[in-house]
Image (cartoon, rainbow, N blue to C red):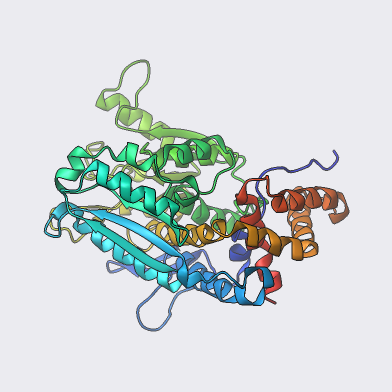
């Protein structure tokens, strides 16, 4: 069979990330008094002496800073000052409102990580008395402010604003090129269709990245030209169907050739029946098949089993499965986090994320990375000029990626690579292709 042209996205940063020897997917790490040797490390940040291989966040964030500093070495990008690019978070709620206490902590974490990547962090805070009209007027200004690379509303809003403001309608007014958290329903729709888009939702995108490096390193999966592992032949289960995690994750996985089970939810059933016993049976039947389990139900405790308050117990996890658990719920003491998967089930998994240091840091890192990409979208003419000036590097890089994925010779992939390079440079094409291409060639330019 001859070489088949590839026409989807190509490039990005993952080809660099997954090739780094320092980025080891499985690590030995203590957590709550127990020692684990098959943890998927989303953070990699350890207080004091570095004892464990670097994780997703600790690899990507310093690399983004290095790349931002390198802009001054590229003539077409010299005018871009990353420190002038702002990642804006909008927080609505009174300071004494416990409903937004967790949001404040999360905003602080995002702010710190944003600055480490070379960008500026900006927060706009409003009392719970703010009106819909006032928020619309503010949003109009933020959408038109070229110094803001991405903007997001920290949901839910607190107090009266949380009841009076239609946040879905508000988020649908976010400019698509600044919708770094995937809150605009148009972004969600494009993502579900696999269409050209500026961004993906941060949490599901981070979960796919954590899965991808495991599949590439441990299972020998092919790395697609867009920097995501091929999930072909794998049965994957998504538990949860929220608009910004479960549902987009399910659709993303389909686009990457996975055989998708679920998504499971609180109304799962069969034959028109969704009583608790029927639900439990279906939950177990599907989860025991899954090569990869994604937990994103998002609440705790669950009332599925008599012997555990977790959603997934040991009976439900297939021997050797990969477990990516995005849920982090807290009891009334607010101290101990809980995921979807019972810790007792971990012994059956080939690898898993912990309640802290797994998906959470990956989500924050993905958000900051999208802020970094947003800066490039705001300067897309400069990006395209940089690609034009380095066209030979773009074609060479694309040729290698395409040939590797297709198992073909570089001569077979050459014409396809040239066509994709021309698409990235073309001002009529979606800006995502130019930004992906720049991310792909920066390691070569920085040598």
Viewer-side residue, 181 vs 58? 181
Which image quarter is the N terminus in? top right
Return the residue nearer the eye: 305 or 167.
Answer: 167
Residue drawn at x 59%, y 42% is 196
Image quarter in which the C terminus is found? bottom right
On screen, residue 159 versus residue 210, left or right, reads left
Residue 198 coordinates in the image, percent (x, y): 54, 48
In this rendered view, identify the residue nearer to me: 358 or 10: 10
**Farthest bottom residue?**
49
Q: Quadrant of residue 267?
A: top left
* Count of numbered badges drawn on the protein: 0
Using residue 39 as the reference point, say whether residue 398 is left or right of it. Answer: right
The percent coordinates of residue 19 (x first, y second) are 63, 66
Where is residue 336? Give x, y as percent. 21, 59
Q: Residue furthest top?
A: 271
Which image quarter: residue 242?
A: top left
Image height check: is 315 above or below 361?
above
Q: Is residue 288 visible?
A: no
Query: Is 271 located above or below residue 150 in the figure?
Result: above
Above-or-below relation of 308 to 148: above
Kindly give the residue lying farthest to the right in the view shown.
411
* Residue positioned 41% across, 56% down in the render: 363
Q: Nearer the viewer, residue 352 or 134?
A: 134
Q: Can I make out residue 193 in this image?
A: yes
Residue at left offset 60%, top offset 54%: 219
List x then y, in percent, for residue 441: 69, 64
Q: Who's the residue at 48% across and 64% down the image? A: 56
């Amino acid at each position: 069979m001859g070489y088949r042209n590839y026409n989807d996205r190509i490039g990005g940063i993952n080809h660099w990330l997954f090739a780094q020897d320092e980025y080891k997917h499985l690590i030995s790490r203590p957590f709550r008094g127990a020692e684990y040797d098959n943890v998927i490390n989303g953070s990699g940040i350890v207080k004091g002496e570095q004892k464990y291989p670097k994780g997703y966040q600790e690899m990507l964030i310093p690399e983004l800073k290095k790349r931002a500093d390198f802009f001054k070495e590229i003539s077409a990008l010299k005018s871009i000052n990353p420190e002038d690019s702002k990642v804006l978070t909008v927080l609505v709620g009174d300071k004494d409102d416990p409903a937004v206490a967790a949001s404040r902590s999360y905003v602080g974490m995002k702010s710190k990580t944003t600055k480490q990547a070379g960008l500026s962090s900006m927060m706009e805070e409003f009392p719970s008395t703010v009106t819909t009209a006032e928020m619309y007027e503010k949003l109009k200004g933020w959408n038109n402010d070229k110094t803001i690379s991405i903007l997001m509303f920290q949901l839910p809003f607190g107090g009266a604003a949380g009841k009076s403001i239609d946040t879905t309608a508000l988020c649908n007014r976010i400019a698509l090129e600044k919708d770094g958290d995937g809150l605009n329903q148009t972004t969600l729709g494009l993502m579900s269709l696999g269409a050209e888009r500026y961004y993906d939702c941060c949490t599901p995108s981070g979960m796919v990245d954590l899965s991808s490096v495991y599949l590439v390193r441990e299972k020998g999966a092919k790395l697609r030209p867009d920097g995501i592992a091929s999930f072909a032949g794998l049965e994957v289960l998504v538990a949860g169907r929220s608009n910004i995690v479960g549902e987009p994750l399910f659709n993303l996985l389909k686009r990457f050739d996975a055989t998708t089970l679920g998504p499971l939810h609180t109304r799962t059933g069969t034959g028109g029946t969704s009583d608790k016993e029927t639900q439990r049976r279906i939950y177990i039947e599907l989860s025991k098949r899954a090569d990869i389990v994604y937990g994103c139900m998002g609440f705790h405790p669950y009332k599925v089993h008599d012997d555990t308050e977790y959603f997934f117990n040991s009976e439900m996890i297939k021997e050797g499965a990969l477990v990516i658990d995005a849920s982090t719920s807290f009891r009334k003491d607010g101290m101990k986090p809980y995921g979807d998967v019972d810790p007792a089930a971990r012994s059956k998994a080939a690898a898993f994320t912990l309640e802290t240091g797994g998906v959470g840091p990956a989500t924050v890192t993905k958000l900051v990375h999208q802020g970094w990409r947003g800066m490039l979208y705001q300067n897309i003419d400069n990006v395209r000029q940089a690609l034009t000036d380095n066209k030979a590097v773009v074609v060479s890089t694309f040729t290698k990626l395409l040939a590797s994925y297709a198992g073909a010779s570089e001569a077979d992939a050459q014409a396809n690579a040239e066509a994709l390079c021309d698409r990235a440079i073309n001002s009529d094409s979606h800006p995502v292709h130019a930004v992906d291409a720049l991310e792909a060639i920066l390691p070569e330019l920085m040598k």
